[in-house]
Amino acid sequence: MFVLGLTGGTGAGKSAAAGIFRDLGAYIIDADEISRGILNIGSQAYSETVSRFGKGVLEPDGGIDRKALGGIVFSNPEELVALNQITHKYIFRDMRERLKTDAARKGLTVLDVPLLFSADFDIHYDRSAAVIADTEVRLRRITKRDGIDRALALSRINAQLSNEELRRRADYIIENNTDDIGDLRRKVKSLYERLIKYI
């Protein structure tokens, strides 16, 4: 088994890159997907989140309103830390369990993790890759995708590691400044072919 830690800021195209890795045959462990599941009504993380942030982060049906919660945590670093302290332990526990499966043992496994380089991420990976894009490109993508204004989109970008920091920390960089999915596919395939040589 060879484990790649894949990261990238919001709007950079990390999820698209992960999807291409999946198409090429990699086993994907998606932290965002897991985070959505652990916040289901009735879960421990759900209870802790509502207790910490109040009922103002709930949809009418009682589910977590992710846009409302995001508005709180991305505009206040202390609140983001608080949310991460609640959710990370559950997300990382699930990821460790998935790493024990047969699918993970067979070949290339990609950990799709926005906060790969956070201090509390202690899951082993063999190499890391970061998907990056220019700020203006990311702003355009985020405002279109999430239906939010530039100010909120920029606060989300600023709450994450800069491209410069990602360049410094990651073993591989995937630049994704165009909307040509074929260009991204070529870059991901090239990296995939390099990595499977280690298996």
Image (cartoon, grey):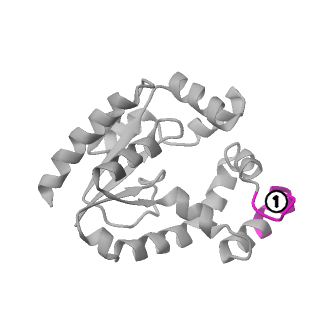
Left/right placement of residue 50 relative to residue 190 reads right
Q: Which residues are magenta?
A: 51-64
32 vs 174: above or below: below
> Residue 125 in magenta?
no
x, y percentage for residue 119?
45, 59
81 vs 92: above or below: above
User: In what quadrant of the picture does the C terminus appear?
Assistant: bottom left
x, y percentage for residue 151?
70, 29
Q: Which residue is mark 1?
A: 58
x, y percentage for residue 134?
46, 25
Where disc 1 sits, the SS reads loop
Query: Which residue is depicted at the point 77% across and 63% down?
Result: 63
Q: Amino acid at mark 1?
A: Leu
User: In what quadrant of the picture does the N terminus appear?
Assistant: bottom left
Q: Is residue 154 visible?
A: no
Q: Is residue 82 visible?
A: yes
Farthest residue toward the left? 197
> Residue 61 in magenta?
yes
Query: Which residue is depicted at the point 53% across and 42% down?
Result: 160
Query: Which residue is depicted at the point 23% across and 63% down?
Result: 107
Left/right placement of residue 100 relative to residue 190 reads right
Left/right placement of residue 162 relative to residue 4 reads right
User: To which quarter of the image does residue 126 belong?
Assistant: bottom left
x, y percentage for residue 60?
87, 59
User: To which quarter of the image does residue 148 belong?
Assistant: top right
